[in-house]
Image: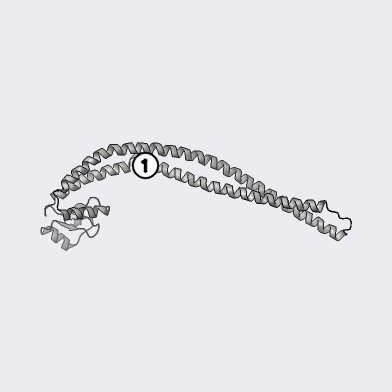
Amino acid sequence: MSIEKILKYQEVDMKLFKLENELKTSEPAKKMIFYQNATKQSYETLTRLNEIAETAMENIKKNMSALAEIDKQIEEIATGDLPDCDEKQLDYFAKQLEKLEQQADDLEREMSRINKELSETNSKYKKEYEQAGKSSKSYRAYTEEFNNLKKEKSVEAGEIMRELKDLEKDINTLLLDKYKKVKANKKRPVFVPFIKPCSCGGCGMEIASDIIDKLSEGLKIQDCPNCGRIIYNKD
């Protein structure tokens, strides 16, 4: 089986692969992906900070309600009519007042802590929001640069694809299908030379003697059992 045409096809196909790889690894592509991820991360952080702020506000409301209730109880005890109370009862009311006042102090300290946390959260939110805006702006700029580069390379890619279509007409269908199947498994190049005395030109691994015999007996192509590429022998 002549493999000259499929090798020519592979040569042209590798040009397309190289072109696509150049686009994927181009600086605009890298920057676009970087700022896309940065923008996504910033908005995730903003969402988390917003949730923290909402929880803090809810806690402030709960504490304010609890503090108002305590103040009400303190006022009721402090302004109540206690002329008939004995010393034991007065001591009880005094301890109740002390307990309520301690609870009020604890709530006020907790509210002070929450307010500080809320202030810090709002500050972080503002900074992250500004950062998100910068990242988003950079992402749009590099996306535009990437798309322009993609348009430039698409012209060359189109010419290569047309050349591949023309070459396909003269290639054995089964051989071409085999090529495309191996290619779909991310194996590049698909056809690799037999490296004497016993190695695959793709993965470099030693191949079995029966495969070597077949390559030497005129069956010019064999599958590599190690990497799945197609080994050819032009001798």
Residue type indicated by callout 1? Lys
Residue extending farthest bottom: 210
Q: Quadrant of the N terminus?
A: bottom left
Identify the residue shown where x is 19% and y is 62%: 208
Q: Is residue 1 above or below residue 130?
A: below
Residue 125 seen by the camera:
yes
Residue at the spot x=59%, y=43% of the render?
Answer: 120
* Badge 1 element: helix
Q: Nearer the viewer, residue 93 or 21?
A: 93
Residue 153 in which image quadrant = top left
How many marks the image carries: the answer is 1
Q: Position of residue 216 (x, y in %)?
A: 12, 58
Residue 59 location in percent, x, y?
A: 63, 50
Question: Could you tell me which residue is drawn at 38 percent across and 41 percent down?
Answer: 32
Disc 1 target residue: 30
Q: How is the image coloured?
A: one colour
The vertical placement of 3 against 128, above or below, is below
